[in-house]
Image (cartoon, helix red, strand yellow):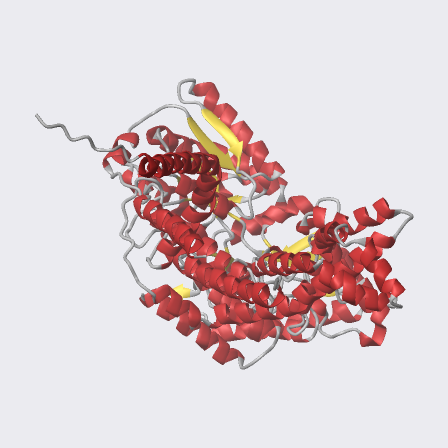
Amino acid sequence: MIGRAKVLAAAVGFGLVLAGCSSGGGGASAQASVAQARGPITIWYSNNEQEVAWGKSMVEAWNAAHPDEKIDGQEIPAGKSSEEVIGAAITAGTTPCLVFNTAPSAVGQFQRQGGLVNLATFPDGASYIESRTGAAASQYKADDGGYYQLPWKANPVMIFYDKDMFKKAGLDAEKPDLSTFDNFLAAARKLKSSGAAKYAINPAASSEFYQPQFDFMPVYAAESGGKQIVADGKAVFNDAAGLATANFWKTIYAEGLAGKETVQGDAFATKVSAMAIVGPWAIASYKGKVNWGAVPVPTSTGKAANETYTFSDAKNVGLYSACKNQATAWDVLKFATSQEQDGDLLTKTGQMPLRADLQKAYPDFFTKNPAYTQFGDQAARVVEVPGGPHTVEILQILRDAYTKAVISGEGDLQQSLNDAADKVNALLAQ
Amino acid sequence: MATTLTPKPVLAEVPARRGSEHRRHRARQSFLGWLFSAPYLVFVAVIFAYPLGFALYMSVHDYFFTAPGVNVVRPFVGARNYLKALSDPAVLRSFGNLGVFLVINVPLTVVLSLVLATLLNRVVHARAFLRVSFYLPYLTASVALVGVWLFLFSGSGLVNQVLGPLAPSPPWLVNERLAMPSIALFVTWKQLGFYILLYLAALQNVGTELYEAAATDGATRWQAFWNVTVPGVRSATVLVLLLATITGANLFTEPYLLTGGGGPNGASSSPVLVMYQQGIQQGKPGYAAAIGVLLVILTLVIAFLQNKFGGERD
């Protein structure tokens, strides 16, 4: 027995020694030289059909003109989420040069890991980003003043509704008044009581950290007039706008207008719910299934559409530090986000490039596709997740409070929001 | 010149030579022993000891993963991560949930797999079909089976339709009291085939003469089962207990998928799910490692007790 214990202790000790020795070394000098290097690069893009089509055509266009600096375009490897795949690749040093699917909520952690290149270190880095995206670029600026992501495209979250179900419930299917909380709730009650739909709306009631982006945050952004849930290093989601938002959703759950169970597949596309709160990326999946319309998210006072903010649901581009030819990668990044390529992205995916002059830049597209005009307009008023390395933790704290106080309806709502805000403030103070 | 002849210590030299040969023989054997053990020792060192050592190292540092070559300070924090874990309501709740899971899952696994294995051992017709039927859920990916259970246990699912007015509200998987028991039932059902297989193997070693002797003594089927089968497969029972506990302690997929991330309100979160959230999603692997080490210690204590009270005494 003693022998076994000794062997075990020795084995664990051996492990500890190896662990202690495994910390990496190196420095920033190598990084500086690769910043000037040119040559072939690898990029990852999202694996949905529309973005793959855009990615392939962009790569083809670049490669035709740059035979010495070719791009190897690949779909992002499968995993629980893109962020986990990228995070693991950063640790292993196997990230590609560019990932056209970098979630803003993960950027702070990637930056802390040393996985991202500060784009502001390129001579024209900051000016390119700011001239392309305009004032909205400031939401993507890191605390150190750098840009560790290029704001690429937004999916401004709006309320989609099923025109056929609205007609069945006796509601105006062409111009439904869903602008105020009261009107939204009245329509939702009618949809449910008429039997037109099982649920009026059905955002996922699950506990994942990213879910607030599709229930609390869009409505809070609208109700607060464009505030992030954290401002000046303090949580603000427990203010009057936050309470109104939480009360709105609490009523929806309390009256059974939304389900609390996991629905397999898309509840809106499968006609389980009459409304969805989502961005235009989902339109492709509704084709041939739902006769849809879209309106801005509601507010307590019914703000006009051109004053209503929402959550961006943006996906950005990161240039990763494992890249050996960063000068080429930066040129590719500018090429892939040029007016021409942005136009191709808009046409192929229906997602909104984060450009200051979006509707003016692509008048033909919006004339031919009037249904997208409101998304183009809404893209000018989008709110992002708070930046920094604690984003995911902040969102999880908010989600935990939300599932308990709003979805389950337990405890005092204001107190729950205050408690969550205190936790976030304590975290941010560390 | 006087010469002194010293008599050769013949009798003393023989044992000395033999001792030396014996030592050489033992050294040779020892060397061969280490040589043959080396692949497994290397395997243990690389696959088990290194990760465990690394986990211990991470758990006492403010550790986070970085890109290769990035120099960062990961200060030693001593027991801070452990103290934080032991005072974190989410962590404590996850361990409590795990307790509920194990209390339901482990005994149910042992009893059902033993009873079903005993019955399957007696079946003459369609034996292979029945064995495969029980084994099939074990072979199927949880992700696929979760879809079936979501359908069965939803508010309007088959189970609630059968139960009618007795159906719980809120439904099973979104009910704070029933979410974890539902997961325990799911895992029991899914893993049963594997444990049945273990018991079937053990049952082949229980001599038929023991059953004949019991029958001669007038034992009923139940008495024969209790007095012959149960003691006869005792070592398999300890193995099932240990494996079910260890597998249960690693619970992750089911709360992640079946109850949407440990819901409702953390009622079905497990320590491994919390580790995943903290270590992978929130970028705090040092803290996650501390939770992991606590889980390993807890599992070892349970396994020790199971072995002590359930193991062979002879």
Q: Is residue B273 above or below residue A239?
A: above
Q: Say left or right for B122 vs B60.
A: right
Residue A300, position as x, y percentages in the image: 56, 72
Q: How many marks?
A: 0
Quarter of the figure with the N terminus of chain B: top left
Q: Is residue B177 above or below residue A335?
A: below
Viewer can see residue A77: yes
In which quarter of the view is residue B81 placed? Answer: bottom left
Q: Say left or right for A365 vs A259.
A: left
Residue A109, position as x, y percentages in the image: 39, 51
In which quarter of the view is residue B288 placed? Answer: bottom left
Camera-side residue of A334 and A172: A334
Camera-side residue of A331 and B140: B140
Residue sticking out furthest to the front: B2
Quarter of the figure with the C terminus of chain B: bottom right
Residue A227, position as x, y percentages in the image: 43, 64
In which quarter of the view is residue B42 placed? Answer: top left
Residue sticking out furthest to the top: A67
Residue at figure coordinates x 69%, y 72% from the top left: A186
Q: Say left or right for B303 vs A178.
A: left
Residue A116, position as x, y percentages in the image: 36, 43
Viewer can see residue A248: no
Camera-side residue of B221 and B279: B221
Residue at figure coordinates x 33%, y 43% from the top left: A22
Residue sticking out furthest to the left: B1
Q: Is residue B42 above or below residue A256?
A: above
